[in-house]
């Protein structure tokens, strides 16, 4: 069974175009469709889905660029739950791309009273910000096994090492 799973993973990695590329292309077509019919809420929801897919395919810089206007839009429209989800994804992208300025901006907003009610999450975010300013590695999140597997990938190894050196 393990061999079969490895064969499927190998096949998935060597598809051309990759599964993620197909999904991103289809999401872009859907976004273009919603632009024609002027449906900004559906469009922004699809942009967040596209960013999630880009993160899963380790294209965090592209995802971060997609998320910045969405975070601004959700903030303006007062969508607190959607804003929190978009900020969490943007924070992850900022960390994986070693964008300290974006990481600090998203972390401060996530730690704000209006965005997050959980005291432990606020405490963890503020601790990570202090560590960043003191040039120490960030504390693991509640989902550390997910972050660990992403950060151990060759694509993000350099980012992790750069953040640890800071």
Image (cartoon, helix red, strand yellow):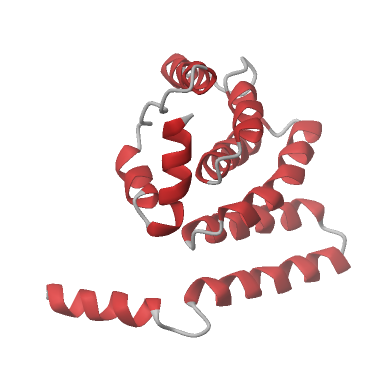
**Quadrant where the N terminus is found in the figure:** bottom left
Horizontal and vertical percent position of residue 108: 62, 21
Horizontal and vertical percent position of residue 139: 38, 26
Kindly indicate the quadrant of the structure image that contains residue 89. top right
Task: Give the camera-side residue of 29 and 98.
Answer: 98
Look at 54% across and 19% down and name the residue there: 133
- Looking at the image, residue 9 lies above or below residue 51: below
Direction from residue 21 to residue 138 in the image, left or right: left
Direction from residue 42 to residue 140 in the image, left or right: left
Residue placed furthest toward the front? 165
Horizontal and vertical percent position of residue 55: 52, 55
- Looking at the image, residue 8 lies above or below residue 73: below
Direction from residue 57 to residue 40 in the image, left or right: right
- Looking at the image, residue 47 lies above or below residue 121: below
Look at 60% across and 33% down and name the residue there: 100
Horizontal and vertical percent position of residue 4: 18, 80
Task: Give the camera-side residue of 42 and 128.
Answer: 128
């Amino acid at each position: 069974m393990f061999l079969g799973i490895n064969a499927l993973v190998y096949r998935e990695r060597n598809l051309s175009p990759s599964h993620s590329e197909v999904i991103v292309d289809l999401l872009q077509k859907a976004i273009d469709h919603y632009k024609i019919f002027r449906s900004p809420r559906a469009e922004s929801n699809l942009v967040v889905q596209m960013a999630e897919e880009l993160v899963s395919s380790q294209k965090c810089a592209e995802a971060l660029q997609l998320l910045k206007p969405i975070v601004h839009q959700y903030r303006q429209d007062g969508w607190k739950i959607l804003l929190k989800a978009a900020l969490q994804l943007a924070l992850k992208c900022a960390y994986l791309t070693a964008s300290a300025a974006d990481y600090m901006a998203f972390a401060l907003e996530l730690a704000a009273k209006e965005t997050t009610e959980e005291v432990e999450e606020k405490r963890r975010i503020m601790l990570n910000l202090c560590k960043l300013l003191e040039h120490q590695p960030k504390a693991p999140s509640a989902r550390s096994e997910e972050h660990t597997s992403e950060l151990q990938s060759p694509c993000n190894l350099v980012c992790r090492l750069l953040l640890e050196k800071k």
